[in-house]
Amino acid sequence: MPKPRPETGSILAWTALLFALVVLPLLGLLTNSARLYLIRQGVHTAAEAACEDAAWSAADRRTFRDTGTLTFLPRWQVQSLAQSTYAATRPPQDTLQYVTALAVVPDYAARVVRCTARVDVFWLFLPGRTRFALHVASRIRTR
């Protein structure tokens, strides 16, 4: 009867090592990449909605309709409208674990509202974070 080789059961060790060093990190990277994509798409949609709302609300239509002169709402009012739209349409921050801020700059001379959303996404399973900015511009329309 042949003697058992000393390598019996070594496949279990190799499988565990492969799982710990390759499969788990790839799974974590895949999860983080999917989260980053969802956050980026949701924040971009929310920034576009906020910028469109600010551009639509910037022109004082009542005065334009009554007098024919183009006037604009105060900057703080346009920024407040954009911030409330952004807060209502962005993805949930507590579930996806990210931090975001929206900057709204109405340029009445060029009839443009520029919005910049800055996002910090904290990685799950890995140390660090990813930071990016999304830029959106919308034309101010009078009609």
Image (tube, rainbow, N blue to C red):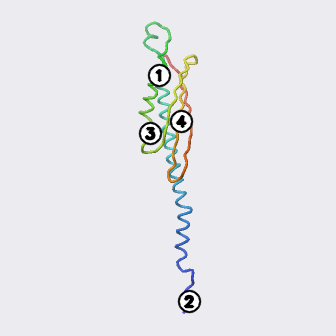
Q: Are marks 3 and 1 in contact (CB under 8 Å)?
A: no
| Residue matched to label 1 | 78
Q: Earlier in the sequence, mark 4 or mark 1?
A: 1
Q: Earlier in the sequence, mark 3 or mark 2?
A: 2
Compared to residue 2, the image places residue 36 above or below, namely above
Q: Residues within 10 Å of mark 4 (few under 14, many from 20)?
A: some
Q: Quadrant of residue 95?
A: top left
Q: In whole angstroms, how far apart are the C-alphas of marks 2 and 4? A: 66 Å
Q: Residues within 10 Å of mark 3 (few under 14, many from 20)?
A: some
Q: Secondary structure at mark 1?
A: helix
Q: Residue drawn at (56%, 36%), measured in percent from left and top? A: 133
Compared to residue 20, the image places residue 67 above or below, namely above
Q: In whole angstroms, how far apart are the C-alphas of marks 4 and 3? A: 14 Å
Q: Earlier in the sequence, mark 4 or mark 3?
A: 3
| Residue matched to label 4 | 118
Q: Earlier in the sequence, mark 2 or mark 4?
A: 2
Label 4 or label 3, whichever lies nearer to me, is 4
Q: Are marks 2 and 4 in contact (CB under 8 Å)?
A: no
Q: Quadrant of residue 22?
A: bottom right
Q: Secondary structure at mark 4?
A: strand
Q: Secondary structure at mark 2?
A: loop
Q: In whole angstroms, how far apart are the C-alphas of marks 2 and 1? A: 84 Å
**Amino acid bearing label 4:** Arg
| Residue matched to label 2 | 3
Label 2 or label 4, whichever lies nearer to me, is 4
Q: Position of residue 29 (x, y in %)?
A: 54, 53
| Residue matched to label 3 | 91
